[in-house]
Amino acid sequence: MLVSAKEMIEKAHEGHYAVGAFNINNMEWTKAILMAAEECKSPVMLGVSEGAGKYMCGYKNVVAMVKEMHDFLGITVPVAVHLDHGSFEGAKACIEAGFTSVMFDGSHYDFEENVEKSKEILALAHSKGISVECEVGGIGGTEDGVTSNGELADPEECGKIAALGVDFLAAGIGNIHGKYPADWKGLNFDRLAEIQKSTAGKPLVLHGGSGIPSDQIAKAISLGVSKINVNTELQLVFADATRKYIEAGKDLEGKGYDPRKLLAPGTKAIQEKVVAMMKEFGSAGKAE
Ligand code: 13P
């Protein structure tokens, strides 16, 4: 059964570890992540961006695929299907489609509008037992080759959004989506500590979880981060393993061009990376 992420994230917060929210793009991604979670007995969140939702032919299709795969593979650990960086309309559509968790990202609106829209999504989602993540302060990233630094969230605004009853809160602390630039300043732990204080101990979410050094991950968890989002790292290991397979000419040997063979090394690489990250985040063994 797919579950809301509320309980797994609260347990992580109390137990000082983090649950990974790994983005899915297709069947191979989903299978690899579910198998990794089962292998190391970890709760897991499957993140779905609006773009990936369209790519997978709609939110209902995503829910149906995850449910069937979950049962077919005999998955026993808690699994949440979560909308990543949802728009107002996207969050409503996912609530209708059977997602068990949604992120409403109103960080680009004026603060008051973010509050009003967050309230509406919270009421709707909570009436159906669906967990909700909201965001304050932008997460940086690379667009058109230019990498912007992550914006630092205002602790006071974080406190106000947290008080609306969000289940977990994404707050910018210098984190960036995609690859970190060589001159990245690192996470801002002073700001993280202030945010944890102003949100009265609400579980916090670290976006941009790919490529952050382990010591910074551990420190972020110790300061209240209970959910870590990972997308880029899985894309990189998949591409790398697939390139090696093709460059070694394996697709030309026998029936190496069969998609089930061609996509196997990349899928295995995703599974191994997710297992390693679940161990690093401390969620491995927590679903036993
Ligand atoms: P990365 O690009 O660092 O993997 O971040 C993913 C993310 O935060 C999705 O919301």
Image: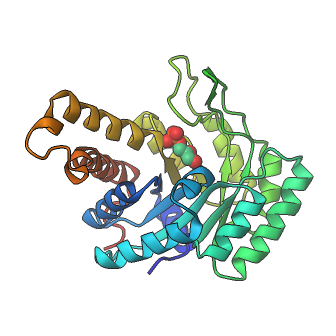
Quadrant assignment for the C terminus: bottom left
Q: Nearer the viewer, residue 188 or 35?
A: 35
Q: Nearer the viewer, residue 215 or 151?
A: 151
Which of the 4 quarters of the picture holds residue 42? bottom left
Count of numbered circles on the image: 0
Q: Residue furthest left?
A: 254
Q: State left or right for residue 95 relative to residue 158.
A: left
Up-down relation of residue 241 to residue 12 (above or below): above
Residue under the point 67% across and 82% down: 128
Where in the figure is residue 285, as x and y percent of width and height? 31, 65
Where in the figure is residue 105, as x and y percent of width and height? 72, 53
Q: State left or right for residue 243 relative to residue 261.
A: right
Which of the colour schemes (rainbow, by chain, secondary structure, one colour) is used? rainbow
Where in the figure is residue 249, as x and y percent of width and height? 15, 31
Residue under the point 40% across and 51% down: 281
Which of the 4 quarters of the picture holds residue 163? bottom right
Residue under the point 88% across and 49% down: 111
Does residue 209 appear anywhere in the picture? Answer: no
Q: Nearer the viewer, residue 224 or 174?
A: 174
Where in the figure is residue 60, as x and y percent of width and height? 56, 71
Residue under the point 58% across and 71% down: 99
